[in-house]
Image: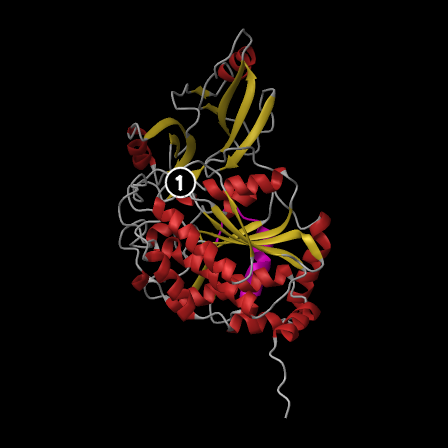
Amino acid sequence: MVAVHLVLAAVLHGAAPPQPSQVWVAHSVDDSALPGVAVEPRGVYRDFALSLITTTSTTMKTRTLDAPNRRTFLSAADPDATLFVVETNGAAELAKVQQDNTTAMKVVGSQGLSVVVAAAVWPDIDKALASIVVPVPTSAVRAAATPTGWRGPHIKRIQAKLASGLADPIIVEALADVKQDNLMANIEELSEIHTRHSETADALRAQGLIEAKLMQLGYQISTFNFRTGYSSNVIATLPGTKFPDQYVIAGAHYDSRTTPATDKVGRAPGADDNGSGSAHILEIARVISESKIAFEYSVHLALFSGEEQGLLGSRAWAKELADTGVQVVAMFNSDMMGWKLPGTVPTLGMKDRYIADWLLNIANGLAEQYVPEIKVGSSSSCCSDHQSFTENGFPAIGYFENEGSASDYPHYHKSTDLPEFVDAENMQLVSKACLSTLMTFAVPDKDATAAQREAAAPPAVEA
């Protein structure tokens, strides 16, 4: 197949020629002969793969610009802006997006029915024009994680136990303790905050609320600052009893937004997006803490900021974990858990992009085993914080509320995203499904759990 390349950004500032230069190239997925001194893969999209090439002005001209069947676009986009791939719904819609060249969103090129734009934050695109807008990674995409190597023996044990149909009694007990009332109370408390836009004092208030709740439950709490002026990620840690240096992560973003994305003063209650995912993390933290459950593997419960601006908080933290060699067994993300499509039964829609397929297969099986009340399906809702971990070489999947997309929710990114539109039953069942997977991968330590429960039990009263 002949690769079609699209150069999206041009020469960076330099000194004497030949100048090191960076160009963005859109190309076919199977093209492995990209010219350049260094080639950084930056993701696979519906119509192309994207790479950032470091080269010289000479090789750029002779090998890239003059190559046959390649169209060249020299972009005036700010090199510090984030790129987004807008996957349009058709040729007419493509033309309309291409014409929307403003200071807020700079069109830098197109290929097939997709447009690449540069923007400071996740751009608002009418869903009639494009239902999917993907933030381009800000660093090289690492090789996909596999169920082999140091993960291999653990994954095989999980698969064997799932095939046996034997449920873990500690997991069954924990799932029974996930309460609708607690989930809704958490959503209501977060939604009462005027906005949780990442760059506001209210987001800092939400961060403080989350920290206080997790600290009260006895977790080790840390924060991860990723950008000046933004609220921080909050990470609660429960050390493992046998594999303390290997981590199972459950995450959700706690920031919210209204429309437009740049509005920092408008009401943004974010009950479903993503008060529901945040409420889930707080509730499973309560269940694990109050049930005195110990795990063989360490657990991180992470709440991210900056998701609504382009996965900023999770991308920074996932990259830090990868750069420092932290061993992540798997990551389970929850984003929008509580709205049912009209006329449907309670449904779990597992995200179908930027995931580890083998991990998804296990998670689907566990949901069917431990939460038979919920229908398990697939969702095209695409992008959330699980993508950050997949890009950094960690196995990750995303839990969602139905088999549709985020934009199907009529209150998506609006001031009307209120608790009254969250279905408590759907929310509870999706939360149970995610918790069953987290606990299966973290492995309840029966002896340590029994010891913790015995130590916490009130002294026997003498007759």
Whether residue 143 is visible here, answered yes or no, is no
Please say which color scheme the image uses: secondary structure
Q: Nearer the viewer, residue 68 or 296?
A: 296
Q: In the picture, which quadrant includes the N terminus?
A: top right
Image height of 426 relative to 52, above or below:
below
Q: Is residue 298 left or right of residue 267?
A: right
- Where, by quadrant of the figure, is residue 111 drawn? top left
Locate the C terminus by quadrant.
bottom right
The reply, left or right, for residue 111 in relation to residue 223 is left
- Residue 367 rendering spot, x and y as whole percentages: 54, 65
Seen in the picture, residue 257 relative to 70 is either above or below; the reply is below
Task: Residue type at mark 1: give it.
Answer: Gln
Helix, strand or loop status at disc 1? helix
Image vertical order of residue 321 relative to residue 71, above or below:
below
Give whichever of 402, 455 is nearer the camera: 455
Residue drawn at x 53%, y 12% is 57
Query: 10 Å neighbourhood of mark 1: few (<14), some, or many (≥20)?
Result: many
Query: Which residue is tagged 1?
Result: 309
On screen, residue 363 versus residue 75, left or right, reads right
Quarter residue 16 falls in: top right
User: Relative to 385, is 404 on the left or the right?
Assistant: left
- Tell me where residue 118 appears, x and y as whole percent: 39, 30
Residue 359 appearing in the image: yes
The x and y percentages for residue 79 are 44, 24
In the image, the segment drawn in magenta is: 351-367
Q: What is the x, y in percent for residue 300?
A: 57, 54
Residue that lies at the very extreme toward the front in this rendered image:
462
Q: 258 or 426, which is in the foreground?
A: 258
Q: Residue at x 56, y 58 (%)?
A: 219
